[in-house]
Image: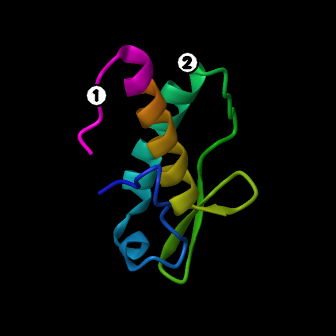
């Protein structure tokens, strides 16, 4: 499950409790790869800790929902730039 760039996932969304640290680490790796194409670099981006069942990432102790929302935006604009139509 991923965030929709038009309807962001909030940090308190129940789905955020289902993500494990390895899953979030994989999303961070994708964020590094996709962000690089747009000039976005986060050299120290990594999982930080789990608080109240939610994985935090290391850039201002942001919730993993921030990663999902950033990826949704990058995926959307990456597809748009490639000329691939969106499904919705």
Labels 1, 2: front one: 1
Residue 9 shown in magenta: no
Q: Nearer the viewer, residue 4 or 37?
A: 4
User: Residue 70's quadrant in the figure?
Assistant: top right
Image quadrant occupied by the N terminus: bottom left
Task: Please report the residue visible at 44 percent of the width from the left and 59 percent of the height from the top.
Answer: 21
Outermost residue, left side: 87
Query: Could you tell me residue 57's position as x and y percent?
Result: 61, 56
Task: Please report the residue visible at 64 percent of the width from the left and 43 percent of the height from the top.
Answer: 45
Image quadrant occupied by the C terminus: top left
Label disc, if present, on residue 28 of the rendered structure: none
Residue 67 higher or lower than 17, as above or below: above
Looking at the rendering, the stretch of residues picked out in magenta corresponds to 79-88
Residue position marked by numbered label 2 in the rendering: 37
Label disc, if present, on residue 85 of the rendered structure: 1
- Of marks 1 and 2, which one's residue comes earlier in the chain? 2
Q: Nearer the viewer, residue 59 or 4?
A: 4
Task: Estimate the spatial distance between the alpha carbons at disc 1 and disc 2, rounded to whole Å.
Answer: 19 Å
Q: Nearer the viewer, residue 44 or 87?
A: 87
In the structure shown, which secondary structural element does the residue marked by tag 2 occupy? Answer: helix
In the structure shown, which secondary structural element does the residue marked by tag 1 occupy? Answer: loop
Colour setup of the view: rainbow
Query: Could you tell me residue 19's position as x and y percent?
Result: 37, 65
Query: Could you tell me residue 66's position as x and y percent?
Result: 58, 56
Query: Could you tell me residue 84's position as x and y percent?
Result: 29, 22
Task: Please report the residue visible at 52 percent of the width from the left and 61 percent of the height from the top.
Answer: 65
Tell me: 45 left or right of 65. Answer: right
Q: Nearer the viewer, residue 43 or 88?
A: 88
Crowd around label 2: few <14 · some 14–19 · many ≥20 (10 Å): few
Residue 80 higher or lower than 50, as above or below: above
Outermost residue, bottom side: 52
Task: Please report the residue visible at 51 percent of the width from the left and 52 percent of the height from the top.
Answer: 69
């Amino acid at each position: 499950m991923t965030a929709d760039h038009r309807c962001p996932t909030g940090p308190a969304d129940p789905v955020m409790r289902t993500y494990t640290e390895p899953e979030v680490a994989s999303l961070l790796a994708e964020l590094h790869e996709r962000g690089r194409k747009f000039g976005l670099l986060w050299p120290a981006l990594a999982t930080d800790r789990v608080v109240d069942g939610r994985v935090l990432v290391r850039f201002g102790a942001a919730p993993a929902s921030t990663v999902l929302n950033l990826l949704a935006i990058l995926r959307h604009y990456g597809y748009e730039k490639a000329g691939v139509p969106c499904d919705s």
